[in-house]
Structure formats: structure tokens, C-alpha cells
Image: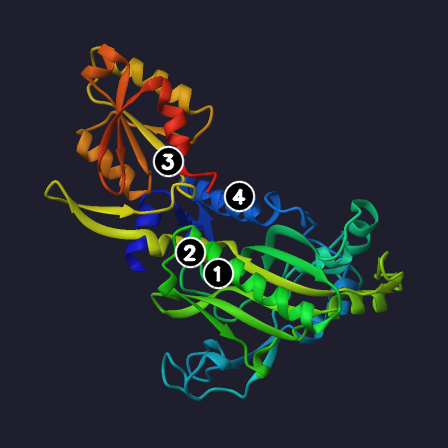
Amino acid sequence: MEKLVNLCKRRGIIFPSSDIYGGLSSTWDYGPLGVELKRNVKEAWWREMVQRRLDVLGLDAAILMHPRTWEASGHLQSFTDPLVDCKSCKQRFRADHLDSNRCPECGGELTEARQFNLMLKTFMGPVEDTASTIYLRPETAQGIFVNFPNIVDTQRVKLPFGVAQIGKSFRNEITPGNFIFRTREFEQMEMEFFIKPDPEEEAKWFEYWLTERFGWYVKFGINADHLRLRPHEKDELSHYSRGTTDIEFLYPFGWGELEGVAKRGSYDLDRHAEFSGKDLTYFEEETRSRFRPWVIEPAAGVDRALLAFLLDSYDEDVVENEERIVLRLDPRLAPIKAAVFPLLRKGGQPEKAQEVLRMLQRQFVVAYDQAGSIGRRYRRQDEVGTPFGITIDHQTMEDNTVTLRDRDSTVQDRIAINELARVLEERIGWLK
């Protein structure tokens, strides 16, 4: 993990937040390359979960919601972790993450566990009192549930159907850490899939979404041996869950949750109907009946997924007797799709390289580098996962062809400039 963290800072992928002031615990900023990588992860999820399906719609709900939302959802009462304090060094820990009843830092005596609510609160308006208290959402799901009648009324949907969104969530974690694995501010990719309230339908769609979501990580480069399914024990289920299975990834610190697939039943719609007094039922034309659907929820963390992709792509090898670091990211996720290099700084090569750059920028995120030896330039791009290097050389000036180098194999092909965009699109594999 340390090697990856250093690479991320050195190459502008992820920086410590507020770095000039010494940072802020477990908060991170995505740099110029990190923001592209993060955007690509989200777009890959959105393309798979929404754009390529007819049964899933998109939503972007507000972060700030009516406080009654969190009463109805149960988060004010039940969204807690057990907290203990060390009587000696005063550090705080999650009791369920400790192997003994002694402080893991100094060995001191711990206090009795007490329940700590993870909701982050703030105030709306000019007066800070209980009447103006609101909360930063701890999950994006509730924005979908409170919009259920709006979606049903406007979109002519039929069961089963899903509603997906990507957005920021906030949790006042007791012990954040492990780089971007556990933070207080994070981004989620969640989908609520509404089905008929029937145990057989629930079992069918639960297995379907487990298979789909596991396969998505493998499709985009995660080694299947580094993934596993772990059903939750009854005593660890969330207050809304009828059953949850985590897709876990083998991080350097051990197995950790990458995504959860949960059976939420009709808990959320039932509670919001009760607290709001609104009709949150679905009318089924075929049976002429009204009911509140049950829900299957695949919920993934953008940051955790990004971390898994980085970890599984990180590699060190030797090319032409020189050691290199390489991120073997799937080309669809890579922050930069190609880099353009003039072999020399004369003979019209830089001008030709700029022409190629401008042409490719219409479709791709492309880098340009003319400093240092061509080998050094290749290595710099390998480090950040750029899958293709394009070199303008003497032959380019004669026949309008370039060399196209593959990051992983280092094989170079001769490609005509007017074919370059098509070849890149084919090799990036967006249609897969």
C-alpha cells in the first residue's frame, strides 16, 4: 500500500487534503490524473448499470434532505457503531474492530462501549438551534426512496425496475483510515431495484445482482481470486436489511468490503409512507392491485473501487534492462488514453506531433511529452497507466505513419495517422 500511496502523490493521482496545513485526517483530494480515473470508474458503472439497460433509470438527488427523512429511514436511531475510549492515551476505537479489551496503541484500559451515531449534522439558515438542524446524508439511497412516487408518476415504469445514482455521502467514522478505503467523505454508486413483494422474485433478483456486480469488477481488470462473497451474519445486518452479502476485495490489510448487495424489502417505502402520510404504493395494471415493492440494493463505493483497481493494476517489471513501475489499468479506466511523443525536437517532428495531438483530443484524453529520452518518456506514462504511446519519427515525415506502443507488451506497430483514432478506439475496447 505504501508504494501505491507514494506513487499517487508523486504523479498527481491522489493528494492529502489541505496538505499545506499538514492535512486533515482521512480526507483526500483527487489530482489531475486521479479525477480522470475517478470519472472513468463512475462512467463505467453508469454505462453498465443505466445506459445499457432499459429497466434502470438515473437520478441525482440533493445531499441535504428534510430532517424527517432520517427519522423515517431509522438512521437517527439505528445508524451507530460501538465506541470505546482508552483511559490512558485517550484514543478512540470501534469496539467491534478490537481483538481484546485493551488499547491496541498503548495497552491501556478501555471504557465500556457506547453507541455512537455516524450522522454528520449541520445547520440550515442563520440560527444554530435544534429547529435548524439538518444532516449530511450517510447514503444516497434515501433520495431514491423519497422520489419513488415522482418516478412512478412521470416515467411510466413497470416492475421490475431500478433507479440508480452516484453521489457524495458522509459518515462520522470513529476510525477512518487505510488510505481512501475508509473516509468520512466518500462517493457512492447505488441502485435500488424495485420488484414484486414475493420471496421467489427476491431470491432470483438477489442472485442476479450478486453475479452481475461481481462480474463487473472482473470485467474491468480485478483478479477474480482477489474477490469473494461474504454473507452477513444476523447480528451485523443493517437495520433495514433482510439479508446482505458483501463483495469483498483482498486489500493489503486483508479482506474488506468493496460492495454490498442487500435485500431491503419494503422497509424504506413503508417508513416514508408512515412518516410523510403520502401514498408510496405501486399500481399493477395486470392484477389491478396496489402494493409497496420490495427492493434489492447493490451499493458500491467509488473510492474503494478505484483503490481496488489501482492495487490490482500496480506492477513492477524490467523492460530493456531497466526497472519500471507500471499501472496495468484497463484502457477504459486509464486517466490518459494515449501519449504523443516527437522523437526529436527538430525536423518538423514537434509540429507534426502537435497535429496528431489536436486530432486525437477530439475523442480522447491525450498527453504530450518531448522532454528526455524516448525510453524515459515511455516509463513516465507507464507509471500512470497510459495504455498507448504514439511516436512521431523520421518515417512519419516521409509516409504519415507513427509507431503505436502497447504499455503491457511494449510491442510497437506502424499505424497510418488517418487510421490512428479508429485503432485506438478499437483497442481501448469501449464496446466490450
Measuring 36% from the left and 69% from the top, which residue is drawn there?
Answer: 253
Quadrant position of the N terminus in the picture: bottom left
Closer to the eye: label 4 or 2: 2
Q: Secondary structure at mark 2?
A: helix
Residue 427: numbered disc: 3
In contact (CB < 8 Å): disc 4 and disc 1 = no
Q: Which residue is mark 1?
A: 214
Measuring 28% from the left and 43% from the top, which residue is drawn there?
Answer: 383
In contact (CB < 8 Å): disc 1 and disc 2 = yes
In the rendered image, the residue lying farthest to the front is 286
Amino acid type at mark 2? Val
Q: Which residue is mark 2?
A: 218
Q: Residue 246: percent from the left, percent from the top?
A: 51, 69
Q: Residues within 10 Å of mark 4 (few under 14, many from 20)?
A: some
- The alpha-carbon separation of the residues under discs 4 and 2 comes to 16 Å
Residue 43: numbered disc: 4
Amino acid type at mark 1? Phe
